[in-house]
Image (tube, rainbow, N blue to C red):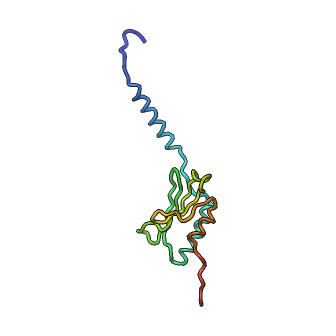
């Protein structure tokens, strides 16, 4: 630096803040979202298909978020979801990655095996009288 150049003062905290927000944006863009894989969707959609055939369910929605994937089941399109089937890999070592949650927030079943968790909302078979 020569003596003819003016001295520029920059607050150090502002530079750090700008760098951190730029890094956070890069991480947010590259952070993978959690989603259901093909075998999980096959299991969920087989239960969903049976319930649609029975006339109990009519619509569904799939959300892929940063921390969890959610498959919501609706009786009608404009209502709250009857059930939410959630996949949270963060809980896989503790209570299990999969859970079934009701509209009120009550956890019906939680576990490591998706098929076993889905049995809780499938219900018991009904006797059909001809």
Q: Where 25 falls versus 107 (above or below)?
A: above
Which of the 4 quarters of the picture holds residue 99?
bottom right
- In percent of width and height, residue 34 lies at 55, 52
Left or right of 94? Residue 61 is: left
Q: Where 30 falls versus 120 (above or below)?
A: above
Front-lying residue, 53 or 85:
85
Count of residue discs: 0
Residue drawn at (38%, 25%) of the image: 11
- In percent of width and height, residue 55 lies at 51, 77
Quadrant the C terminus occupies: bottom right
Which of the 4 quarters of the picture holds residue 87?
bottom right
Residue drawn at (46%, 34%) of the image: 20
- In percent of width and height, residue 2 lies at 41, 10
Residue drawn at (35%, 14%) of the image: 6
Farthest residue to the bottom: give it.
130
Q: Where 14 falls versus 93 (above or below)?
A: above
Front-lying residue, 61 or 125:
125
Left or right of 43? Residue 25 is: left
Farthest residue to the top: give it.
3
Q: Where 110 falls versus 19 (above or below)?
A: below
Quadrant the N terminus occupies: top left
């Amino acid at each position: 630096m020569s003596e003819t150049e003016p001295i520029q003062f920059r607050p150090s905290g502002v530079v750090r803040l700008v760098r951190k927000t730029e890094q956070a944006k890069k991480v947010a863009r590259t952070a993978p979202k959690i989603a259901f894989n093909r075998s999980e969707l096959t299991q969920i959609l087989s239960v969903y298909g049976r319930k649609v055939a029975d006339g109990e369910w009519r619509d569904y929605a799939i959300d892929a978020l940063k921390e969890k994937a959610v498959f919501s089941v609706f009786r009608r399109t404009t209502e709250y979801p009857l059930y939410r089937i959630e996949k949270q890999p963060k809980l896989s070592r503790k209570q299990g990655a999969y859970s079934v949650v009701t509209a009120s927030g009550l956890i019906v079943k939680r576990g490591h095996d998706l098929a076993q968790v889905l049995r809780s909302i499938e219900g018991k078979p009904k006797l059909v009288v001809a």
